[in-house]
């Protein structure tokens, strides 16, 4: 009987011991989970729940009135002034002034002034600048400046984008700078790159070692083509022009003189062109230009022209071209109206603007010239 009694007690002891181990395991697991899922609240470092140890802590949520400091953020952080994360940040970081991530940001960065970080995956928004030391996979949006080593995505800046390698596009109000572009550059004034496997679009100038499709008034392409030429059209406007670009697209800028007028004689021209059917001795050029005649006093004369110019290469550096054009003219000057009167055989149609003294004309013309290629 004693054996049975002791056996029952031993069985009960085992159950109690097993239950205790189970409860201890749950407590340990919960304690570990609570330690990992930490939140840090405060005014500024070190006046926070994590105190002076905040730079060593990993948090899932941080909310501070002024400045938040931590080692790693695995969730969102909010600071009235700045978030300072010594290592990685996963999630969204919001700061009234700046976010500073020591290593990689994997999520979103939103700052009123600036974001600084080593690398990032996601999007970064800053009122002034996004400053990355290494690779960015995603998008940078800044009111003034974006910088990165490699960008697998896009950069949007009010003033400038600077990167080493771009695998998508850059958009800047003033200037884009990159070493290798596997995409496009769009700038209000200037694009600078070494090698472009896409399109460069600038309000004024593109600079590159190689770029087949630059769209700008001036394109300084080392492996491209540049030429200086002299032209004349049906209105006796002669131009000295500079054409520059890549193998496919080029820009045009020119200045000249109209020999038919007495007052509106100073001519200016800018536009774009494209080469087709290029061979050793022949090619076809399609050009779209905007020109004007000025006396720098009263009155306006504007001429938008689309022309098709077959070109014959006499030598490697000398080319002659002549071809038809179609133009749309808007003018309110006496000499401008006389250049394309209703009796002119080149004029297809003329109509008067009822709300002003401007007259518009659609006409057929020509242009011919010679250029020296270098």
Image: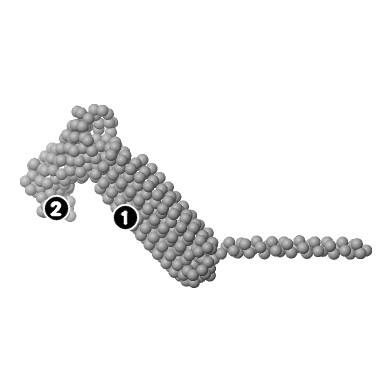
Q: Horizontal placement of 287 versus 52: left or right?
A: left
Residue located 53% across and 68% down the image: 50
- Image spot of residue 257 (x, y percent): 11, 43
Going by the image, does 146 lie left or right of 324?
right
Taking depth in this image into account, of 304 and 192 the one nearest to the observer is: 192
**Residue 11 appears in which quarter of the rendering?**
bottom right
Residue depicted at 8% across the width and 42% down the height: 260
Asked whether residue 229 appears in the rendered view, the answer is yes
The x and y percentages for residue 272 are 25, 42
Identify the residue position indicated by label 1 in the image: 159
Q: Secondary structure at mark 2?
A: loop
Give 247 or 334, whichever is nearer the viewer: 247
Query: Label 2, label 1: how many angstroms apart (C-alpha)?
Result: 40 Å
Q: Given this view, does label 2 or label 1 mark the residue nearer the observer? A: 1
Q: Quadrant of the C terminus?
A: top left
Q: Is residue 361 visible?
A: no
183 or 21: which is nearer to us?
21
Q: Is residue 204 left or right of residue 240?
A: right
With 308 as the anchor, is 24 left or right in this view?
A: right
> Which residue occupies 33% across, 49% down?
177
Residue ID at (22%, 30%): 316
Circle 2: is it few (<14), some (14-19), or many (20+) Cα within 10 Å?
Answer: few
Name the image colouring: one colour
Q: Are marks 2 and 1 in contact (CB under 8 Å)?
A: no
Identify residue for label 2: 357
x%, y% of residue 303? 18, 45
Q: Position of residue 81 (x, y in %)?
A: 42, 67
- Residue most toward the right? 1
Residue 66 vertical position relative to residue 287 in the rendered view, above or below: below
């Amino acid at each position: 009987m004693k054996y049975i009694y002791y056996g029952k007690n031993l069985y009960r002891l085992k159950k109690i011991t097993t239950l205790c181990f189970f409860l201890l395991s749950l407590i340990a697991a919960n304690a570990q989970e609570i330690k990992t899922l930490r939140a840090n609240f405060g005014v500024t470092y070190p006046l926070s729940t994590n105190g002076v140890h905040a730079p060593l802590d990993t948090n899932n949520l941080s909310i501070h009135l002024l400045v938040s400091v931590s080692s790693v953020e695995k969730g969102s952080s909010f600071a009235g002034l700045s978030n300072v994360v010594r290592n990685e940040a996963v999630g969204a970081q919001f700061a009234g002034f700046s976010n500073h991530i020591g290593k990689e940001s994997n999520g979103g960065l939103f700052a009123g002034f600036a974001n600084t970080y080593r690398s990032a995956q996601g999007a970064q928004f800053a009122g002034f600048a996004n400053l990355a030391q290494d690779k960015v996979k995603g998008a940078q949006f800044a009111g003034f400046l974006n910088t990165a080593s490699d960008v697998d995505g896009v950069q949007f800046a009010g003033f400038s984008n600077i990167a080493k390698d771009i695998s998508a596009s850059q958009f800047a109000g003033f200037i884009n700078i990159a070493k290798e572009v596997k995409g496009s550059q769009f700038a209000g004034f200037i694009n600078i790159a070494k090698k472009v496997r896409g399109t460069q679009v600038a309000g004024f100038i593109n600079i590159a070692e190689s770029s087949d499709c630059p769209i700008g008034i001036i394109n300084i392409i080392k492996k491209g083509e540049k030429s200086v030429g002299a032209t004349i059209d049906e209105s006796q406007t002669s131009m000295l022009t500079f054409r520059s670009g890549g193998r496919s697209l080029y820009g045009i800028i020119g200045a000249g003189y109209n020999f038919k007028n007495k007052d509106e004689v100073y001519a200016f021209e800018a536009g774009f062109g494209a080469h087709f059917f290029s061979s050793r001795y022949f090619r076809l050029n399609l050009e779209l230009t905007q020109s004007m005649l000025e006396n720098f006093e009263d009155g306006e004369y504007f001429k938008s022209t689309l022309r098709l110019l077959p070109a014959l290469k006499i030598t490697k550096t000398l080319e002659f071209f002549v071809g038809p054009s179609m133009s749309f003219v808007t003018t309110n000057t006496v000499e401008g109206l006389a250049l394309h009167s209703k009796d002119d055989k080149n004029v297809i149609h003329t109509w008067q603007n009822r709300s002003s003294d401007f007259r518009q004309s659609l006409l057929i013309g020509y242009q011919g010239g010679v250029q020296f290629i270098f």
